[in-house]
Amino acid sequence: MLVLAALPVIADDSGHSRLPFLGDEARKRGIELPLPFGVGLVYYKLQRDIQVNEVRVGRNGAAPAPVPDAVAFSSNSDVDNLNLKFDVWLLPFLNVYAIVGDIKNTSTTTVALGDQSVSLPTKLDGSVGGLGVTLAGGVGSFFGALDVNGARADIGFDDRFHALVSSARAGWHGTARSRPVRVWANATYWDTFATARGTVTDATGGTLKFEVDQGPKYPWTYGAGFSYSFTPSFDFSTDLGADFHGGWYVAIVPVWRF
């Protein structure tokens, strides 16, 4: 989630915020820095195929055992995620941020045995929170950035899901109507592999404990985006991409800076 985005600004005697540290050195070199603090909304829409590596089931308190290999599982996921994001530029090239929000996941899992199959739709709602860091730099009109963020989602299973998302982008920055504009290409690796654990009641009134090892079938996505600073206090960014196997995502991020 490489979207650059809250606390009161502390100004020094020069009229600039004390953050980012080394900001005056950057300004002496003619670098225009964004306001150091930001608060914004991050809307994410993601659709992709899910790879189910193994399913284990146990009845009425028995330890879960692997389902026979003759049973095949496949799944897809449709995720809507809305986060509130707080960020601060600690250094001219270092941004740190925190996110907290809501996540909705709609999935369809297909269970196949021989030439017979059944599809099981599920809808899960929950919360998500995380921390991230961005490193950015550039030469002339070109820039590059690396972003890593870790998040934890609670969507109703026994364990919370943990995710580590890493992305790299390269692009061009300039001005449009005297305001900063940036365009880029990026590649992202979604390390969201996890085991879903839970217990449900079966048709006979007994209990079924399940464990599902699963993750994105195609963990790499490739995309492009742009951002524009309408004023020194308001940025707007959007990013879209695909895994080139039917999966895709779009991100829309308005940010207020101060």
Image: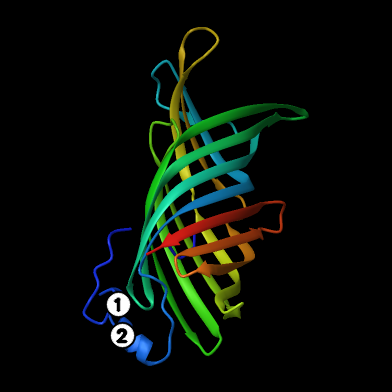
| Mark 2 closeness class: few <14, some 14–19, many ≥20 residues within 10 Å | some
- The outermost residue toward the top is 204
User: Mark number for residue 16?
Assistant: 1
Q: Nearer the viewer, mark 2 or mark 1?
A: 1
In this view, the residue in front, 27 or 48, is: 27
How many other residues sit within 10 Å of disc 1, few (<14), some (14-19) or many (≥20)? some
Q: Is label 2 in a helix, a strand or a loop?
A: helix
When the figure is inspected, residue 17 is found, relative to residue 159, above or below; the finding is below
Specify the label residue 150 is tagged with.
none
Q: Is residue 233 above or below residue 210?
A: below
Displayed quadrant of residue 111: top right
Q: Amino acid at mark 1?
A: His
Q: Are marks 2 and 1 in contact (CB under 8 Å)?
A: yes
Seen in the picture, residue 114 relative to 146 is either above or below; the reply is: above
The residue lying toward the viewer, choosing from 93 and 69, is 93
* Of 1 and 252, the residue lying toward us: 252
The kind of residue tagged 2 is Asp
- Residue 237 picture quarter: bottom right
C-alpha separation, residue under disc 2 versus residue under disc 1: 8 Å
Task: Spot the residue most to the right.
Answer: 115
Residue 22 drawn at (x, y percent): 29, 83
